[in-house]
């Protein structure tokens, strides 16, 4: 890609329905993550001019004059209009309105379905029609509200890949709001909204690797948290962190020093079974007991009791090979580079 699209700096201050003070860089495909109710939709509506707020840019323009396309949750297609008529809706009435709508549908690969009604389209196809309609007025900014919410798990990744590719092709900055970390992984730039402001912003690889707060880590898919204190620090190498009844190694961070209270975060996917006789290979051994197991597609999620309540994810094959059942005592392991250390809040 990518950002042939110009970057745009958005500032938004609002009081109702909730207080927000947001300053955010929109670069290429940008995803703003936040939990439900944090104000994501309100922010988009304010930027689009649908809620009163102080907004820059475009804040001095009337709603219909803002060069912004806003795609609400669920796409809001007109059910009684065919795909091409939905796309043509914002176009001015002219002799080539039909042709222009077909050209837009062609750009999202849907020209063959131009005569279908929304009820005859899949979730991903509806999204593409809505995208074509949103882009019909050649906006300078595209706002997407929860673009994955109407998609099922089976097609979500495929539709997302396609959505990201399409918005790159159109070459305008896009701000998508979501609570879905999968969407953020595909972004060029991402930010996290909490308590009315942006608490972290950057390239997805950086933000996913180094969440700054427990709440951000939760949003990014971390499931395991331990509270402890730094008890050792080897410059440029390791940190030793200890809590009640456990000690773990994590990657070194310049800002953290001995004595500081910290929170550790680990992904369920990064905890693995310690092989028999391989204790010496395990820098962070944890003794746990299996409290519950849940099948998740081809994986098995184990709920464990150890130094804290923990979760780990095994392939069904691994779980079967290890003959894991509720009540088993296990030795599990996690690599220091997979242990994120955050200052305690
Ligand atoms: N029209 C309204 N009147 C009163 N309160 C509202 C209105 N719209 C939103 N709110 C409140 O403002 C807060 C933020 O809502 P908003 O829809 O912006 O959150 P969100 O982060 O988009 O949530 P979700 O992810 O569930 O869609 C919520 O507490 C909500 O109840």
Image: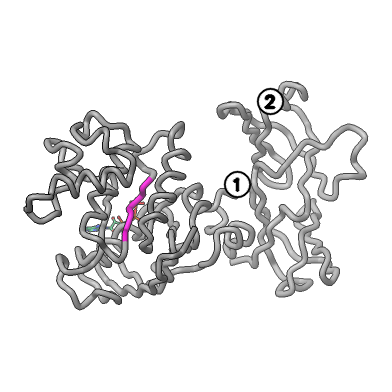
Q: Residue at x 33, y 54 (%)?
A: 144
Instruction: Note whether 278 is above or below 174 in the view shown.
Output: above
Give the image location of residue 164, x and y in percent.
43, 50
Magenta includes 143? yes
For the C terminus, the image quarter is bottom right
**Residue stretch in magenta:** 142-147
Q: Which residue is mark 2?
A: 326
Nearest to N terminus: mark 2 or mark 1: 1
Which quadrant of the frame does ligand 1 lie within? bottom left
Q: Between tags 2 and 1, which lies in front?
A: 1
Residues 289 and 275: in front is: 275
Q: Is residue 335 left or right of residue 121?
A: right
Q: Is the residue marked by circle 1 packed among few (<14), some (14-19), or many (20+) residues within 10 Å?
A: some
The answer to which image quadrant residue 343 occupies is bottom right
Mark 2 to mark 1: distance in Å? 20 Å
Q: Residue at x 38, y 54 (%)?
A: 167
Give the image location of residue 210, x and y in percent.
63, 62
Q: Residue at x 65, y 64 (%)?
A: 342
Q: Residue at x 19, y 63 (%)?
A: 50
Give the image location of residue 103, x and y in percent.
24, 47
Q: Which residue is mark 1?
A: 223
Q: Is residue 292 left or right of residue 252?
A: left
Magenta includes 204? no
Instruction: Note whether 223 is above or below 235 in the view shown.
Output: above
Most prominent secondary structure in the magenta stretch?
strand
Residues 247 and 204: in front is: 204
């Amino acid at each position: 890609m990518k950002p042939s699209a110009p970057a745009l700096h958005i500032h938004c201050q609002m009081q109702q329905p909730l207080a927000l003070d947001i300053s955010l860089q929109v670069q290429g495909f940008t995803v703003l993550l936040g939990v439900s109710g944090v104000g994501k939709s309100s922010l988009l509506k304010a930027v689009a001019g649908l809620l009163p707020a102080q907004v820059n840019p475009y804040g001095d323009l009337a709603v219909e004059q803002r060069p912004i396309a806003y795609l609400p949750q669920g796409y809001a297609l007109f059910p009684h209009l065919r795909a091409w008529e939905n796309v043509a809706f914002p176009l001015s009435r002219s002799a080539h309105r039909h042709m222009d709508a077909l050209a837009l549908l062609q750009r999202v690969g849907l020209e063959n379905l131009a005569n279908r009604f929304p009820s005859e389209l899949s979730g991903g196809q509806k999204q593409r029609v809505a995208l074509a309609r949103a882009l019909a007025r050649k906006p300078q900014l595209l706002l997407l509200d929860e673009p994955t919410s109407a998609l099922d798990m089976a097609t979500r990744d495929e539709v997302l890949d396609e959505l990201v590719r399409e918005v790159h092709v159109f070459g305008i900055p896009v701000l998508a709001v979501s609570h879905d970390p999968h969407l953020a992984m595909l972004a060029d730039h991402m930010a996290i909204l909490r308590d009315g402001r942006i608490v972290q912003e950057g390239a997805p690889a950086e933000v996913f690797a180094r969440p700054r707060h427990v709440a951000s880590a939760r949003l990014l898919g971390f499931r395991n948290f331990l509270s402890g204190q730094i008890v050792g620090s080897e410059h440029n190498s390791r940190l030793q962190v200890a809590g009640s009844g456990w000690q773990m190694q994590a990657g070194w961070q310049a800002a953290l020093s001995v004595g500081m209270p910290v929170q550790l975060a680990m992904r369920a996917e990064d905890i693995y079974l310690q092989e028999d006789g391989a204790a010496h290979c395990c820098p962070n051994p944890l003794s746990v007991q299996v409290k519950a197991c849940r099948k998740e597609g081809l994986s098995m999620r184990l709920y464990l009791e150890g130094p804290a309540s923990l979760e780990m994810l095994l392939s069904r094959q691994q779980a079967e090979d290890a003959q894991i059942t509720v009540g088993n005592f296990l030795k599990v392991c996690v690599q220091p580079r997979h242990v994120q250390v955050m200052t305690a809040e």
